[in-house]
Amino acid sequence: MDAIVVVLVVAGLIFFAGGTVGILRFPDFYSRLHPAGKLDTAGSLLAMTGLAIFNLFPLSVESVLTSLKIVLVVVIVFLASPTATHAIVDAGVRAGLEPWTKKEGKP
Amino acid sequence: MEGFFLGAALTLGFLMLLSLYRGIFGPTVLDRLLGVNAIGSKTTVLLVIIGILYKRVDMFVDISLAYALLNFIAVLAASRYFHKRKGLGGSSG
């Protein structure tokens, strides 16, 4: 069972690392929202699932309830993260931020 | 297994430092908000890992839940506050 935990947590860390590299390297604000919104949510799901499985053993009522609470954190992140990303995009559009395009005159 | 979780926590801390670059030097205010949001979503995972390392998961899960809600409310309120400003700064704006 430890192998499953290691695989899930490492996969979550890989998603987090990809999201961080995307935040650092994408050219403008709107494209930076793409890794920030998606990859953080996916990394949070994978890592939290691994931690919940690790917390489940040895089996008892208390550990099952704690693992359910960890899953509840993931549910809240899945509801909150797209809403927050949408709010940031809305603020950018209303403030008149221009999206990045390929410059005119270059092939 | 303890060493693995310690390494995962250190990796998460390093990734949070990298996200902090966007939080400090981001060209617009909304870039900074985005970096802080990314740090917050990493912190929820980091708090559960800290709870496993201290063998007090039942307490730290509550802190993680509260942190996720607080991060959401903070980003929502700040983006509602900034959407009235024209020209948030930055080179392309």
Image (cartoon, coloured by chain):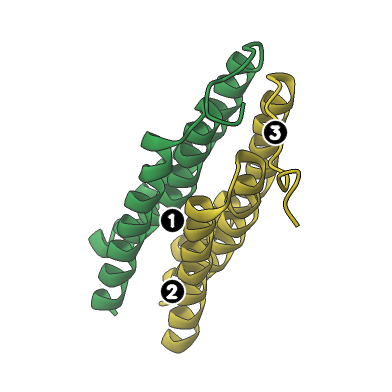
Chain colours: A yellow, B green
- For the residue pair B45 and B51, the one nearer the viewer reads as B45
- The image shows residue A107 at horizontal and vertical percentages of 75, 57
At mark 1, the secondary structure is helix
Circle 3 residue: A89
CA gap, disc 3 and disc 2:
37 Å
Does residue A44 sit above or below B69 in this rendering? below
Answer whether residue B49 is visible to the viewer in this image. yes
Type of the residue with mark 2: Phe
Of the 4 image quadrants, the one containing the C terminus of chain B is: top right
Chain of the residue under label 2: A
Image side of residue A90 versus residue A65, left or right: right
Q: Earlier in the sequence, mark 3 or mark 2?
A: 2
**Neighbours of disc 1 within 10 Å: few (<14), some (14-19), many (20+):** many
Does residue B42 sit above or below A11 in this rendering? above
Type of the residue with mark 1: Val
At mark 2, the secondary structure is helix
CA gap, disc 2 and disc 1:
14 Å
| Residue A54 disc label | 2
Type of the residue with mark 3: Val
CA gap, disc 1 and disc 3:
25 Å
Image side of residue A94 versus residue A43, left or right: right
Q: Residue at x 45, y 43 (%)?
A: B40
Tag in front: 1 or 3:
3
Number of on-image labels: 3
